[in-house]
Amino acid sequence: MTPEDRFPGPETPHSGPRHHQDLDVLPYGSYYEPAEPPAGYGYDETYSGYGGAHYLEQHWHAPAHHGVHPGGHDATVQLGTLHRTGHEQAVHEPAGHEQAPHEPAVHEQPPMAAATGDDPPTIELGPPLTEQPVNFPYPQPEPGEAPGPLYVIGDVHGYLDELLAALRQASLIDADGHWAAGRSRVWFLGDFTDRGPDGIGVIELVMQLAAEAAAAGGYCRALMGNHELLFLGAAKYGDEPVQSTAGTASFLAAWRLNGGQQHDLDRLESHHISWLSRLPAMALEDGHLLLHSDTTAYLEYGESIAEVNDAVHDLLADEGADEWWDCFRRFTKRFAFRGENGPDAVHELLGAYGGYRVVHGHSPIPYLTGAVHADDGAPPHVPGPYIYADELAVAMDGGVTMEGRLLIARLPVN
């Protein structure tokens, strides 16, 4: 059985243009792990080596023009350099690289929600429902009854139609877009907005499904990705300069640079902000440590999952633009689990937070496998979740922004 048989993709709609997608960048270029990592991690320029990686089945091979290069080493990913002039920023790509159109200047930003003593909406319940509640035929779980199946969903980046198609394919929603998964447990791994055509629509769908799933005895929850931090920062701080070890920049400029869509910012409302601001940074489900970013930066925010989530929430509630920016910068790191020492990085996280395997989004699978550029110009080949780092890590970002796939998988993935 091939990965395509186990993870068949829906007839994916094409809801908007997909310009060739670089990795997230800060004002001075693409951001991976630190240039001088701690001793023992052995990162190098190309991050080559896979530590036992495979797509679901050890002996399955992708087509030659899409697969890993002989010997298990990936091609060096060529990345653009960034130049700044005043308040404008642009990425200068390598020759032959198609660049996305420049976003129009932003003159107004929606205000952040006023600070009140009221608790924000819970992640499980989402926003108030304005229409008649849906009648759910599902029975509530009996005491001691086993939980429902567990699903994870990779980065969406505003591609609402693709998300709806994938959810229907997985039988998690019905034809009308309502929860149809009973007591199933669903986790989105973050990055709802930017690059695609309808980030706010994605957020509202997830909030709706959270309410409907709770009424059905299941749940639909979500992690905070680095693009949630960036989007909220652009709304709150705009062009206010921020200082960090990456240099002086602004949230708004970085948001535009990383695919921010003005119509999403225009439609951002206080209940969206309250919900996004309370998303957890990490979670543990059935022995799976769920993260957005493939980085060890979480260790800098606490020694337990609760400490990390509280630290991020406190930072967003009380700290200033520089601290917020530094949090975004840290969670924009990637590729910590690649290379021969990648399993050591995974073990460090698992040792601190529990579980036996990390499941993450953030880094598109074509970049992890070195299959970004096909010689014939074909889209990247992404047959399903990508297991690597001696089978300790599962990557779930199928690269929907670069003609890949929006991935949904039931855990455990073997």
Image: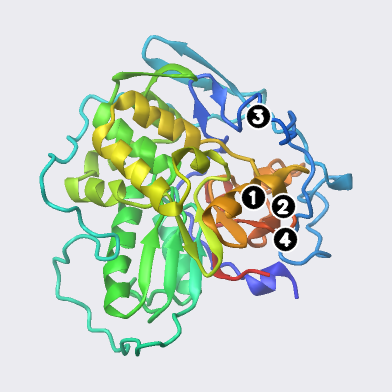
Q: Kindly identify which numbered label has been placed on residue 55.
A: 4
> Going from the N terminus, do you reach mark 1 or mark 2 first?
1
Foreground mark, 2 or 3, reads 3
How many C-alpha atoms fall within 10 Å of the one at disc 3: few (<14), some, or many (≥20)? Answer: few
Q: Helix, strand, or loop for circle 4?
A: loop
x then y, percent, for residue 398: 58, 54
Q: Kindly identify which numbered label has been placed on residue 389.
A: 2
x then y, percent, for residue 229: 37, 39
Q: Helix, strand, or loop for circle 2?
A: loop
Horizontal arrangement in the rendering, residue 28 relative to residue 393 (left or right): left
* Separation of residues labelled 1 and 2 (CA atoms): 8 Å
Q: Quadrant of residue 146?
A: bottom left
Q: Check disc 1 and report the residue beneath it.
A: 346
* Separation of residues labelled 2 and 3 (CA atoms): 18 Å
Q: Amino acid at mark 2?
A: Ala
Foreground mark, 4 or 3, reads 3
x then y, percent, for residue 116: 10, 44
Quarter of the image that includes the N terminus:
bottom right
Q: Kindly identify which numbered label has been placed on residue 37.
A: 3
